[in-house]
Image: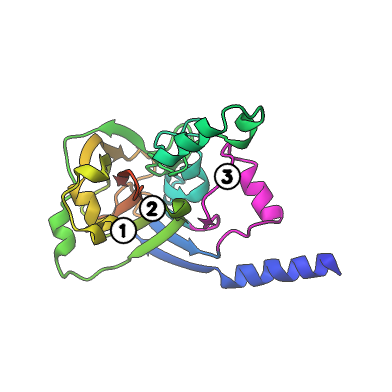
């Protein structure tokens, strides 16, 4: 009876998944949107066993996927597991002030180290997508001075395919929010841009409501790190129309954004675009 019920849940979960595919030339863009990972069960255990983190975000969309794949078998994809693998599992890089006070007040407790497991509880990740392919055929990454033309995104051209997908989100125990989402839109060519930004709340001269608006507060944060990469297509022997390594006349752009705010002390964010 239990096995039959589990099977029913699995079937229902698959039924709730929504898959969209868009083909343009040799490229296929696939997006899969599914349900939040359950708080317990084999799927949860399987997911957490692949991570070193003592806990994962409150809402994890483990089956959500955005993939850009060439017919020759190489490409770029975004998923929650690979993003969380880059979160620091041993160091708390951004501490809330009361955390240290709580720790010091209980310093005489011999089990305190077992209770407190330091890790980056903001789930900040410099995830820029997962490259896939073979040793001979896959995207080559190199630094570039080229930049994504964000002004082009403001034009009212026909959008062939658009997706905004959430991979995970956490309320950070009422200290702010952290989320990772991926967007894919029209563009001339594939570039990947990553930036990390943060500031102390006391140093931000902005309206308080902006602190809970990731897309707005990021404009006021100090850039701490930037990386700009160009993804070079591999040389393919077969130059027929079906395998030619070109995007399309309009091309494609993928954007992954990570934003987190600690509303008590610090607000930080990182974003990657490709």
Query: To which residue does mark 1 refer?
Result: 212
Which residue is painted at 42% across and 51% down in the image? 69
Which residue is painted at 49% across and 62% down in the image? 32
**Residue 87 visible in the current orientation:** no
Which residue is painted at 29% across and 68% down in the image? 160
Reply above or below: 154 against 111.
below
Q: CA distance from mark 1 to mark 3?
A: 23 Å
Q: Earlier in the sequence, mark 1 or mark 3?
A: 3
Residue 226 lies, in percent from the top left, at: 24, 36
- Marks counted in the figure total 3
* Crowdedness near tag 2: few (<14), some (14–19) or many (≥20) residues, C-alpha within 10 Å: some
Residue 55 marker? 3
Q: What kind of element bears circle 3?
A: loop
Residue 122 lies, in percent from the top left, at: 43, 44
Q: What kind of element bears circle 2?
A: loop
Query: To which residue does mark 2 refer?
Result: 176
What colouring method underlies this structural image?
rainbow
**Which of the two residues, 61 or 121, is positioned nearer the viewer here?**
121
* Nearest-to-viewer mark from 1 and 3: 1
Reply above or below: 117 against 220.
above
Q: What kind of element bears circle 1?
A: helix
**Relative to residue 10, is residue 182 drawn left or right?**
left
Which residue is painted at 61% across and 40% down in the image? 50
């Amino acid at each position: 009876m239990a096995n039959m019920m589990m099977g029913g849940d699995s079937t229902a979960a698959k039924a709730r998944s929504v898959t969209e595919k868009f083909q343009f030339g040799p490229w296929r863009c696939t997006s899969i949107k599914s349900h939040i990972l359950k708080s317990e069960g084999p799927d949860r255990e399987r997911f957490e066993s692949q991570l070193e983190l003592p806990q994962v975000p409150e809402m994890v969309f483990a089956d959500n996927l955005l993939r850009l794949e060439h017919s020759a078998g190489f490409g770029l994809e975004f998923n929650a597991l690979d993003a969380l693998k880059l979160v620091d599992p041993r160091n708390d890089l951004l501490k809330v002030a009361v955390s240290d006070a709580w720790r010091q007040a209980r310093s005489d407790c011999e089990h305190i180290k077992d209770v407190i497991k330091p890790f980056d509880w903001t789930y900040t990740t410099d995830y820029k997508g997962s490259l896939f392919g073979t040793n001979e055929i896959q995207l080559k990454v190199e630094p570039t001075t080229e930049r994504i033309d964000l002004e082009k995104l403001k034009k009212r051209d026909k959008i062939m395919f658009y997706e905004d997908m959430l991979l995970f989100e956490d309320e950070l125990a009422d200290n702010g929010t952290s989320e990772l989402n991926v967007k894919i839109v029209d563009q001339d060519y594939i570039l990947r841009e990553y930036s990390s930004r943060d500031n102390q709340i006391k140093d931000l001269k902005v309206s308080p409501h902006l602190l809970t608006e990731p897309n707005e507060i990021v404009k006021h944060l100090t850039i701490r790190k930037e990386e700009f990469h160009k993804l070079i297509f591999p040389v393919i022997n077969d130059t027929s129309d079906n395998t030619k390594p070109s995007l399309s006349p309009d091309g494609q752009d993928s954007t992954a954004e990570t934003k987190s705010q600690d509303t008590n002390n610090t607000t930080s964010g990182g974003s990657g675009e490709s």
